[in-house]
Image: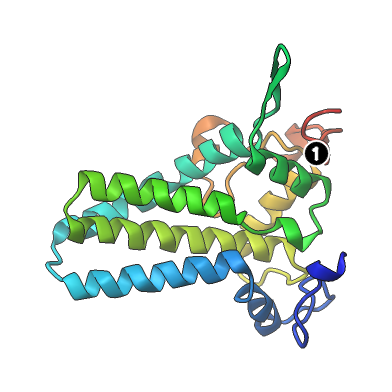
Amino acid sequence: MKPSDLPPHGVVDPRTPDLRMRDALAYFVRRPSVIGLLTLLTGSLVARVWVGDVSRWDLLLAASLVAVHPMSEWLIHVGILHFKPRRYGRWTLDFAVARDHRAHHADPHDPKWWFIPLRSGVVGFLSVTTIAFGLLPTPLALTVMVAALGLGTTYEWIHYLCHTSWRPRSRWYKRLWRLHRLHHFKNENYWMGVTMHAADVLLGTLPEVDEVETSPTCRNLDGR
């Protein structure tokens, strides 16, 4: 690792064998994207409580976001993160977040690539904020922000933990850990979910391991 990528003084490297949960958490909460997510989540939650006027529509909106999350996670992973550069004459169309994700697949053990890039997080936050406050009254818009930021933080935590040396304890997490590692080391075209796999089931990207050949491009998404 580069010196700038090393854990802060006194914080355990998340790739250390026999990593303890408290050490994994200590590293996690110091990452810039996580600090941003937790700050925005706390601020949105405080604002939602302050505004009040809670109704059944808040529960319905939050539940709806959780329900569609597997599909949105799948679509973002497939359509944006796995986007391949396309040439149009002298011009090449590519996304910075896709380049970062290709680097993540090339070196999945490097913590630098385990977290949402800050620029992508800012774009995502501004997009959700604009849509929520443009279409909904303030109380419900704040509910959307709380739910969206909560889902984003959950994604960040589970994805991070899947790449650390901490090993699963529960059946639920063990499954997530196994499927995400299959995506990285077996075949990058399957197991596209991270926190949920309902969309994989629906869209046919959750095969049995022995039904899928090991891909030669797991670590080289652009195939070059």
Which image quadrant: the C terminus? top right
Tag 1: amino acid: Cys
Q: Badge 1: few (under 14), some or many (20 or more) residues near its Cα, within 10 Å?
A: many
Q: Residue at x 32, y 71 (%)?
A: 45
Quadrant assignment for the N terminus: bottom right
The residue singled out by tag 1 in the image is: 218
Where 104 sits versus 23, above or below?
Answer: above
Query: Residue 62: x, y in percent?
Result: 30, 56
Q: Name the residue: 66% across, 63% down.
A: 160
**Left or right of 115 in this view: 219:** right
At which x and y percent is residue 19?
77, 78
Q: Is residue 124 left or right of residue 179?
A: left
When the figure is inspected, residue 147 is found, relative to residue 215, above or below; the finding is below
Measured as percent of width and height from the top left, residue 77 is found at 59, 40
Q: Is residue 123 visible?
A: yes
Residue at left offset 79%, top offset 42%: 186
Query: Image quarter for residue 162?
Result: bottom right
In the rendered structure, the answer to whether residue 120 lies left or right of residue 39 reads right
Toward which corner of the image does residue 39 lie, by quadrant? bottom left
